[in-house]
Amino acid sequence: MSSYGSIMEMEIASTPSVFQSILDAKSQFDSVKNIISEKKIKFVLILARGTSDNAAHFLKYLIEVKMGLPCGLTSPSAVTIYNSKLHYDGTLVIAISQSGQSPDLVAFADAAKRSGGYLIAMTNDESSPLAHLAHHHLSLLAGPELAVAATKSYSAQLLVSYLLVSSWTGATVTGQEIVDQAEELVANTHINSAAVAASSRESEMLFLGRGFSYANAREAALKVQETSKLSVQGLSTADYLHGPISALRESTQLYIVAPHNMPANSISEALVKIRKHVDHITWIGEGGASSGTDIRISGSRCSDEITSSIIDAISLQGFALEFAKKFGFNPDSPEGLSKVTKTL
């Protein structure tokens, strides 16, 4: 049991070097930096499943906030189950997948391409079916990922998404800050100690975020579900106010993903209402307004919310790892799961 999580821990710790590899290979974005204008793109759709689908929400925010383009998430079953005929002229499809192998993603990407869509694939395997199918492939450069729960590949997806949109908008990327802040987080071996010590399997767990932190809230919930066999929710704070908050109890274990430099008003309304029901909140990141008995899992202190969100994925991954180990689960190889999920 002492070796439980050693692979996942090693892969999380390698995130800074993965970030450096991606930043060193920024030239891979040169071939796609003019795609929006050259191909007369009017709509963007993102194709993904599982962890990659959480990264897709991050990319969706980037495209909508930084470019003002309409952007949505695909429904692969429209092709694989319902045999729909697509009409994708003027549409850019961005497929995100660690393995690039899932049959439903490949089938949808093929149908989108044949219907006039332009396809960019973002995978960790340049020899994968999805990579070969795409007009352009962007490598995650994460190296082999052995733990079932994706960590460094998810972080790589966030950074590649950021660099892709930055190449379209001409934004400057502070690469050294990203690597330095990531190194600080992985070096802090006690980052999750207080939060894990206070955690329980007996009460509901809920992760909330908004805007650029929404993807990480969803991913944190998924990581705990995968590694500790619990039903956990990851929601937008805005959506949470539209009904689910009625189920909030004093015993609820509430985690708010709050990156440094997040807008002060992004969660203020939800926070006022949440404080009426729970004694304490656990914060992931350096944003938000902690008080009283709140616990904080340290995050990065980047110069902007977006890069802080990318790096703070390390903190939530580490929490899921230590939480699983506390209760005797092996986060490297959760029972009933495999590394590559091939949905049809």
Image: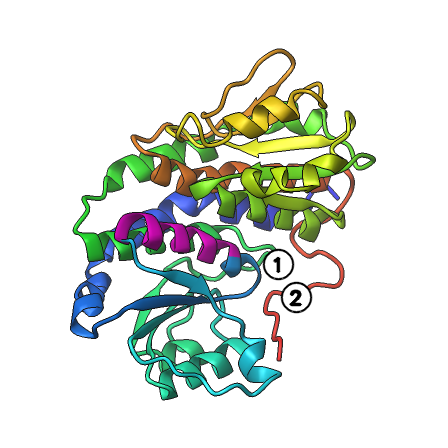
Question: Where residue 129 sits in the image (x, y, percent)?
Answer: 44, 81
Which dot marks residue 119?
none
Quarter holding the N terminus is top right
* Location of residue 115 by image quarter: bottom left
Residues drawn in magenta: 54-67
Which residue is denoted by mark 1 in the rendering? 148
Residue contact at pointers 2 and 1, CB within 8 angstroms: yes
Residue 234 vertical placement versus 91 (above, below):
above
Residue occupying image coordinates x 72% and y 24%: 198
Q: Is residue 27 left or right of residue 117?
A: left
- Mark 2 element type: loop
Q: Residues within 10 Å of mark 1 (few under 14, many from 20)?
A: some
- Residue 114 point in image, percent of width and height: 37, 88
Image quadrant in which the C terminus is located: bottom right
Circle 2 residue: 338
Q: Which secondary structure, mark 1?
A: loop
The answer to whether residue 128 of the structure is visible from this angle is: no
Residue 24 lies, in percent from the top left, at 24, 53
Q: Amino acid at mark 1?
A: Val
Whole-angstrom CA distance, mark 2 to mark 1, is 6 Å
Q: Is residue 115 left or right of residue 321?
A: left
Kind of residue sitting beneath label 2: Ser
- Structural crowding at the residue carrying mark 2, measured as other residues with C-alpha within 10 Å and reported as few (<14), some (14–19) or many (≥20): few
Image-based side of 208 in relation to 264, left or right: right
In percent of the image, x 37 and y 73: which residue is there? 126
Viewer can see residue 210: yes
Q: Quick one: label 2 or label 1, which is nearer the N terminus?
A: 1
Question: Is residue 16 on the magenta stretch?
Answer: no
- Front residue of 125/93: it is 93
